[in-house]
Amino acid sequence: MATLGVERLLNDRSETVEGERLGLITNPSGTDSNLNTTIDLLDAREEFDLRKLFGPEHGLRGDAQAGVKVEDSTDERTGLPVKSLYGEQKRLTPEMMDGVDTVIYDMQDVGCRFYTLIYTLGYALKGVAEADKRMVVLDRPNPISPLPVAGNRIGDDVASFVGAYELPVVHGMTVGELATYFNGEFDVGADVEVVEMRDWSRTDWFSDTDLPWVYPSPNMPTPGTATLYPGMCFFEGTNLSEGRGTTKPFELVGAPWIDADDWAAELSNQGLDGVAFRPAYFSPTFSKHERENVTGVQIHVLDRDAIDPVTVGLTVLASAFTASDDCEWIVYDGDYFIDKLAGGSYLRETIDAADASAEPREIADTIVGSWEGDRTEFLDVRAEYLRY
């Protein structure tokens, strides 16, 4: 079994933070291998002086849905103050760290550019540097680490809380590695220390670690969800349901105007390795098409070692848009949300330019091919920061 960073801190690295006043950025995924929370573990030990808690998107205890602002509060279990990093602002400010010497970060990432918890980490590093404090990152497995790096590097001109720091869609790094990448490549200048894992390999899927999965957000219920997420998250920028409000987010996708049987048959003929499609019928309990009868497909992962989730997601997306004029891109505050996810307008414009006779897989391959230069560039850059 892999030994987590939090377990190493407790068992043989306690001197890392002994005698310091501590803050902790965490959520329900911050546990040891026996499902004890990092909050409780630190609070129970006399040698650790835990003073404040900081909660990301979805809240410290994970009870807020995506995009819902979270207020400051007091943690009922420990009585500690909780400062929200997903409220009126998302940055860890020097004022928040008053009375704290070192901030500990311990949350499970999913290995994809879109996931906001890694930007909580990046923003926290900036705050720590500004306040002349210190950060200790307790490392955790990247659950989809065996997947190849994929996608374009997102530029500063379209950077947001769903994509920044010139990351590709699939980055293949742990949170500890990301912390040093953010700090080193973008001149953050934070005093940061990583408590590394033991007995973890970059070729390990999460199931290979023998660790229990605690979902890091309400719509990331399983490691299988995380496997499809890098491609299916693009549907968040459309008027189709990406399965939020069901028990299979990012595995179910559809809309009321879709012919489920035809769509499943077309997608099954696209030559996508490692997956299968079946017609699916569902009614989301919240989010897009709430309480409506939605028709679409469920994507089944048959061979995770063969799957290319970005190509899968783009093929499904192109197939939907070339088949129906009812499919639309969502606009927020005058901007296409898909452009924030995709790192620019190329994805959207390429799909919009295709006619109904275009093969969805060919459209996807064109988009993925245009990103190859960015992908190889990132591989060279990240090599300096890999630890495992």
Image (spheres, helix red, strand yellow):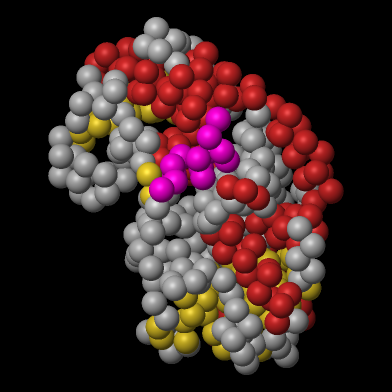
Q: Residue at x 52, y 30 (%)?
A: 347
Asked whether, in this view, residue 96 is left or right of residue 128, the answer is: left
Asked whether, in this view, residue 184 is left or right of residue 257, the answer is: right
Identify which residue, 31 or 135, lies in the foreground. 135
Asked which quadrant contains residue 264, the reply is: top left
Which residue lies most toward the front here? Answer: 334
Asked which quadrant contains residue 118, the reply is: bottom right
What is the x, y in percent for residue 370?
A: 64, 24
Question: Can the viewer see residue 315?
Answer: no
How many numbered circles are shown?
A: 0
Asked which quadrant contains residue 279, the reply is: top left
Identify which residue, 342 or 51, lies in the foreground. 342
Q: Does the magenta-highlighted stretch encompass residue 324?
A: no
Q: Residue at x 15, y 35 (%)?
A: 293
Q: Residue at x 70, y 42 (%)?
A: 202
Rendered view: 375 above or below 319: below
Which residue lies most toward the top here? Answer: 357
Which residue lies most toward the right here? Answer: 384
Identify which residue, 24 or 112, lies in the foreground. 112
What is the x, y in percent for residue 122?
A: 64, 62
What is the x, y in percent for residue 263?
A: 30, 17
Question: Can the viewer see residue 286?
Answer: yes
Q: Does the magenta-highlighted stretch encompass residue 340?
A: yes
Rendered view: 160 above or below 300: below
What is the x, y in percent for residue 218?
A: 37, 55
Q: Residue at x 43, y 72 (%)?
A: 87
Asked whether, in this view, residue 338 is left or right of residue 289, the answer is: right
Asked whether, in this view, residue 10 is left or right of residue 267, the answer is: right
Question: Which residues are drawn in magenta?
Answer: 334-346
Rendered view: 129 above or below 182: below
